[in-house]
Amino acid sequence: MAATTAALRDPAPAAAAALTFPRPIFATVAPHPFLQAHLAAPQPSKAPLRANSRTAHEFRRVGINTGSLTHCNGSAVVRLGNTSAVCGVRAEILDEAHVQATADFAPSTGNETEEDAERERDEMESLRLLVPNVELSTGSTPQHIPGNAPSSFAQTLITRVRSLLLSTSLVRLSDLRILYAPPSNPDGLDAEPEPQLKGYWVLYIDIFYISIDGNAFDAAWAAILAALKNSVIPHAFWDEDLETILCSDDPSEAHSLTLRGLPVPSTFAVFEGKHDWNESGEAEEADWVLSDPDAFEETVCRESVCVVVDCTVGNKGTKDGILKSLEKSGGDVVDRDAMKGLVKRAVDRWAEVEKATNTKP
């Protein structure tokens, strides 16, 4: 009886509860171990999942809606997961009288060569016929509050967009030239009069972000592609009596832009995990190349790669992809062999974006 009473008075101490954190707190306090815990978690017969429930090779689905803005020549809204961007294209006339050194204009022969494309790129760059602009201070992220000055990140996006527009020769210069065909040739009665250059269309490409959850460049470029394909340019002509450029009000005379191909970028981020040592003393691989990184993954990844491919010129679809651009910064994990795998992922991604841009809303 005494032993029973003593047992009731002095109960055995309970085991201490394990210290646990909710997922958001764990991700904030220790972001690197948090992501590695997801990627290194053993899952039999399944690929490891990231914190956003995607595999390392999985991209977010692209959603595109065109013609959303009625006051633009072309517009598109693109959603890439929780990253949303709006692109509007405005066309304004640049009179030839306000342009220097336009006397060397040569009409297109119809057979494009590499020299012709290079000449067009130089002319479009010197005249600033493509003017991209990126606006982040829309409340898209806590770091970009409305009213703030343009950040270095916004300026970097503008530079990358403009560089890719020019290097891929996406917009044809023939769509931007405003020509005038004289009724007769003053140099000869039998010769066909040559067209005269009277001005250009300047395309102002404005990108506004609604929200940013990583991979802002891919979202912006997808919006640009969809907006340019949706753009309609009025018919502009030279009026001899008024000696000025006028635009036709007839919608049937307007023309769409004929783009050169469909270059699509794919961005990857390299997550360098902490290497574990096996029984033989060798370090086990603990690096992952993540497709389409979100905002959280961008903060813990040091190395990034952007691959731009275009598969529209081949007869076999994605098997004939052309590498248009390649950007790599921040580390040396991705070597030559790993880069081949990223190009293959970019080709597969191109097919998804091409399908989304051609789908009518």
Image: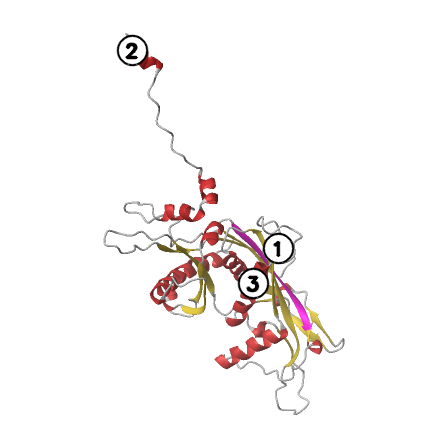
34 and 352: which is toward the camera: 34
Quadrant location of the N terminus in the rendered image: top left
Contact check, label 3 and label 1, Cβ < 8 Å: no
Tag in front: 2 or 1 = 2
15 and 300: which is toward the camera: 15
Disc assigned to residue 69 = 1
Task: Determine crowd level at label 2: few under 14, some 14-19, many 20+ residues with C-alpha closer than 10 A.
Answer: few
Q: Amino acid at mark 1?
A: Leu
Q: Amino acid at mark 2?
A: Thr
123 and 214: which is toward the camera: 214
> Of helix, strand and loop, which one carries label 3?
helix
Lower position in the chain sequence, tag 2 or tag 3: 2
Lower position in the chain sequence, tag 3 or tag 1: 1
* Range covered by the magenta-colored residues: 83-94
**From this viewpoint, which residue is outermost toward the right?**
242
- Location of mark 3 (residue): 156
Disc assigned to residue 100 = none
Which secondary structure type mostly characterizes the magenta part of the structure?
strand
- Location of mark 2 (residue): 4
Lower position in the chain sequence, tag 2 or tag 1: 2
Q: Can you see residue 167?
A: yes
Q: CA distance from mark 2 to mark 1?
A: 82 Å
Place of residue 216 in the rendered image (x, y in percent of width and height, measured from the top left): 52, 56
Q: CA distance from mark 2 to mark 3?
A: 77 Å
Tag in front: 2 or 3 = 2
> Of helix, strand and loop, which one carries label 1?
loop
Place of residue 195 in the rendered image (x, y in percent of width and height, measured from the top left): 63, 82
Give the residue displayed 35% in from the left and 23% down from the top: 13
